[in-house]
Amino acid sequence: MTDLALLGGPPVRTRPFQAWPQFDEAELGVLADVLNSLRWGGIHTGSQGESFETELAEYLQVPHATAVANGTAGLMIALRALDVRPGDEVVVPAMTYLATATAVSLLGGVPVFADIDPATHTITGSSLKAAISERTKAVIAVHLGGHPADMDGLGAIADAYGIPVVEDCAQSLGATWKGTQTGSLGAIGVFSFASTKNISAGEGGAVVTHDHELTERVAALRDHGRPLGRTAQHVELGWNLRLSEFQSAVLRVQLQRLERHLAAKAKGAAFLASALSSLPGLTPVPAALDPRVTAHGRFSFAFTFDGEAFSGEQTRSVTLRAFRTALQAEGIPVSARDLIACPDEPIYADISSRDYSRSRTASAEQARTACSTLVLLGQAAGSGLLLDEPTELTDVARAVQKIHENRHHLHQEQRQSARRRVSSDH
């Protein structure tokens, strides 16, 4: 093959993959309708927000869905609705986006970090059990990357200890566990509609539940503590975490495309898993779907990278950062963000941090390993790559193959880059 693009050779791919997020004339039309209505916000009968809540609840097959400003707000509201108070402990995965933990901290609670299954990168029943104390008030199950957590195992332990399960479904809209939508499996579920998510209005979120009393609290907490349908009588402390009519209208359109997008992404992910399987050091996450996972949300296509196996016996190990940089240079969009296990974030690990917050770590070994080896393609990298046909995705496999065949050159570049960094430091 030719030289690596990182070292001056021609890249494998010069044209972009599909973009993310996506929109067309339908979004433009509904935005114009909201503008002309002069009802741009608030909570009212016949609103875009009310319609979106109804349509989302129908899709998820739950009786109650409440739209909120964003996914983090949804987690805070869900936890407060479950009466999480200062000093209460909430078990969260040691590997997740930090908001899962900070939602607990912002309420004065204490996140307790539990380890993950190395095969799926989701929290397990055994890790939950090891993290429980007399102060445990809830557990948050994160369906990371769109892969449902083991809701059977988690549910059995949570039920035995009388602990409600909050589902963090920020990355899993459309995923199903034994035919049931994520978000409808625990006591309460929370979704995000930020720019990278399966449907998006830039920001936005929703809290869903089967429990009528819980949904009444959720509705009040997102609107200054006012019960739904009232304009006065603020019965408890609440926030202004409502969703605008513009966002609700866009999300209604996006929801109509969801199943088509999920089918395309499933096809793309299956192709990539097969195409990359022959290369050493690359392992898709998961390597094979649990039969109880009847649909994967495919927020991303993830695989772990073993630099030693990728390099082989005759070449020194390629670093994860060098591999990602080389892949980007070949025209393949990949998340460049270094992942950090939650307990190692400064706000939890550094006592001198301005916003240092209390936490407890039950276990995090597998989470730390996963963070140091994970490669993310797709929406996690701001790309609609998984929507493309396999004929386009072949370039991903070609780029990885090219890097592997030139791995000795990549190692030389690693050494030169290290020398340049040392020189610049002095």
Image (cartoon, rainbow, N blue to C red):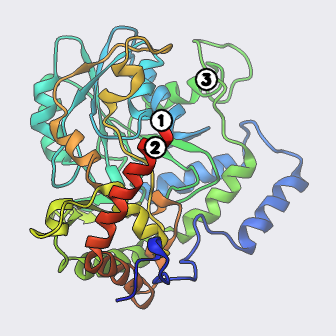
> What amino acid does circle 2 point to?
Ser
User: Element under label 3?
Assistant: loop
Considering only vertical position in the picture, is 353 above or below 59? above
Q: Quadrant of residue 165?
A: top left
Which x, y percent locates residue 352?
42, 11
The reply to whether discs 3 and 1 touch (Cβ–Cβ < 8 Å) is no
User: Element under label 1?
Assistant: loop
Which x, y percent locates residue 199?
54, 59
**How far apart are the two marked residues, 3 and 2, measured between alpha carbons?**
63 Å
Residue receiving disc 2:
423
> What amino acid does circle 3 point to?
Pro
The reply to whether discs 3 and 2 touch (Cβ–Cβ < 8 Å) is no
Outermost residue toward the top? Answer: 87
The residue at 50%/68% (across/down) is 258
Residue receiving disc 3:
227
**How far apart are the two marked residues, 3 and 1, measured between alpha carbons?**
62 Å
Q: Which sits earlier in the primary sequence, circle 3 or circle 1?
A: 3
Residue receiving disc 1:
426
